[in-house]
Amino acid sequence: MDDIESEFKARGLIYAHKNIFDTPELEAAILHQSRNNAPAPFAMLHYKPLSRIDLITGVMRDLPVRRHPPVAIRSAGSAGDGLFATSAIAPGTFLGEYTGRICVVPHTEVQAVGNRNGYLFLLGLLGPFMHDGVMAHVLIDAEPAGNHTRFANHSFAPNCASGSVLLDDGWHVFLATNRAVMPGEQLVYDYGKAYWTNRPHPLAL
């Protein structure tokens, strides 16, 4: 982890071991809303589903202690930086939580904000709710702060999948492998159709 954290420092980024809330009051409000969504523990996968039922057990075991397999941040050519496996990784392996600064964005501004910032992720299955008198969405912003998962690039033929899990302390977004990954292979997942609505067609990875 020290090597990855030094990579963040070199890029002028903040390494976030877990999500960053601006105030304790915001964290409490989001946790309250999360608990109204579904009973904990609850989990699902996005886009490219995994059939391995033991994945959820692995996430619940590894997420609280921030455990993940060896990975490295390296150049991915025209795609910029990428996330690479430094050893073989089995299918259904937890790769890490997608972390960043938690922000609340009015519903009417979500699309525009997402078009400007490619590092946003909806916080689990937490739908829009009333915040300061307006309907708003809760987003994870990994542009200024995050961890190794922010460097995982997009692919329509991914070897990873993103998912959400609701634990006692709220929603978490995570990445996991959906097939065996070889040493040196880039870790990629499907960002979903909405990401590309107002963006150029993605580079093939």
Image (cartoon, grey):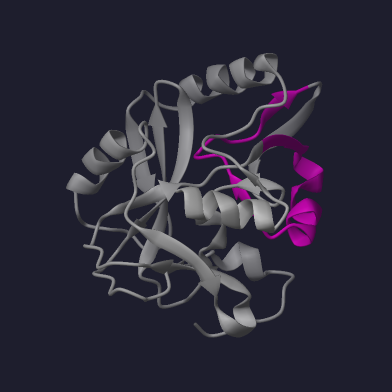
Q: Say whether residue 202 is visible.
A: no
Q: Vertical placement of 151 versus 98: above or below?
A: below
Q: Nearer the viewer, residue 54 or 129?
A: 54
Q: Position of residue 118 (x, y in %)?
A: 69, 60
Q: List x then y, in percent, for residue 130.
A: 71, 24
Up-down relation of residue 24 to residue 129 (above or below)? above
Residue 53 appears in the figure: yes
Tell me the quarter of the picture where residue 150 sits: bottom right
Q: Is residue 70 above or below residue 16?
A: below
Q: Nearer the viewer, residue 66 or 166?
A: 66
Percent position of residue 193, x then y: 57, 67
Seen at 36% across and 67% down, the residue is 85
Q: Which residue is pictured at 66% across the width and 38% down the height?
A: 101
Camera-side residue of 134 and 97? 97
Q: Is residue 111 magenta?
A: yes
Indicate whether residue 130 is drawn in magenta.
yes
Please give the name of the residue rendered at 65% of the width and 41% of the height, measured from the top-left corner: 139
| Position of residue 107 in the picture relative to residue 193 (left or right) | right
Quarter of the image holding residue 127?
top right
Q: How many marks?
A: 0
Q: Position of residue 82 (x, y in %)?
A: 53, 70
* Residue at the image point whose x is 81% and y is 22% from the top: 133
Quadrant location of residue 203? bottom right
Which portion, as a residue range, is magenta?
A: 102-131
With 145 as the anchor, is 193 left or right in this view?
A: left
**As drawn, 170 above or below 119:** above
